[in-house]
């Protein structure tokens, strides 16, 4: 459990969780926000609220480009606040403009193993528009290869190789964040 005095180390910065679909961003984000005692937002949920329909409907009726535009608008609005934990959509890292917003805080890449992601998606296939193909596993592999160089730009990388409870994962992420903060040069007065 993160103690309140430890949370002050973030100095009000937002924490942005990036990574592939089913990597655990939303579940971890809610847990991390609760431990840090700050608000939690999920960009996918906010996009659906703004659009008034599901992401699947946005993709089907208006296309991926429109979805990405809404996603950027939501991220821009969130980045104007402080002390938030934000779970982002898996493809948010693809647009350079989004990185200008992500760099307003600390980005954490939840680097889940491909087998773990596939296992989670198989248990709860849900509506994943980018995997609605004849070979969803190949589509997932292609997406992971395409996005990995972008995820690698995150400030912190947390490898996830097996199922971990949200509280254990929050502790792992917090330790990685603290290590990153210790590695940063001190601010000049």
Image (tube, helix red, strand yellow):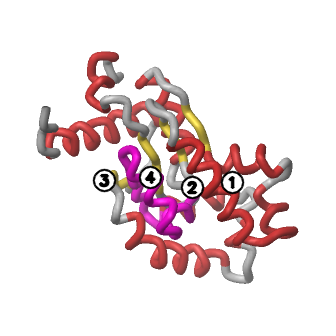
Q: CA distance from mark 1 to mark 3?
A: 29 Å
Image coordinates for residue 55, horizontal then vertical, percent: 76, 57
90 is within the stretch colored magenta: yes
Residue linked to disc 2: 22
Residue linked to disc 1: 124
Q: Which residues are magenta?
A: 89-115
Image coordinates for residue 129, horizontal then vertical, percent: 73, 68
Q: CA distance from mark 4 to mark 1?
A: 28 Å
Residue linked to disc 3: 155
C-beta proximity under 8 Å, tags 4 and 1: no
Chain-order first, disc 1 or disc 3: 1
156 is within the stretch colored magenta: no
Name the mark on residue 102: 4
Instruction: Decide if residue 11 is on the left or right side of residue 71.
Output: left
Q: CA distance from mark 2 to mark 4?
A: 20 Å
C-beta proximity under 8 Å, tags 2 and 3: no
Q: Is residue 158 above or below residue 134?
A: above
C-beta proximity under 8 Å, tags 1 and 2: yes
Q: CA distance from mark 1 to mark 2?
A: 9 Å
Q: Residues within 10 Å of mark 4 (few under 14, many from 20)?
A: many
Q: Residues within 10 Å of mark 2 (few under 14, many from 20)?
A: some
Chain-order first, disc 2 or disc 4: 2
């Amino acid at each position: 459990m993160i103690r309140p005095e430890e949370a002050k180390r973030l100095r009000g910065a937002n924490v942005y969780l990036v990574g592939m679909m089913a990597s655990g961003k939303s579940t971890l984000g809610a847990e991390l926000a609760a431990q840090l005692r700050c608000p939690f937002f999920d960009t996918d949920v906010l996009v659906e609220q703004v659009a008034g329909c599901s992401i699947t409907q946005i993709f089907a009726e208006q296309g991926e480009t429109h979805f990405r535009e809404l996603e950027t608008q939501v991220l821009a609005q969130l980045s104007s606040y402080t002390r938030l934990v934000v779970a982002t959509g898996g493809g948010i890292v693809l647009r350079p403009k989004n990185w200008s917003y992500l760099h307003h805080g600390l980005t954490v890449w939840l680097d889940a193993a491909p087998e773990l992601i596939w296992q989670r998606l198989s248990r709860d296939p849900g509506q994943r528009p980018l995997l609605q193909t004849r070979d969803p596993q190949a589509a997932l592999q292609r997406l992971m290869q395409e996005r990995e160089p972008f995820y690698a730009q995150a400030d912190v990388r947390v490898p996830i190789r097996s199922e971990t409870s949200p509280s254990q994962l929050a502790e792992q992420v917090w330790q990685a964040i603290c290590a990153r903060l210790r590695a940063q040069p001190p601010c000049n007065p």
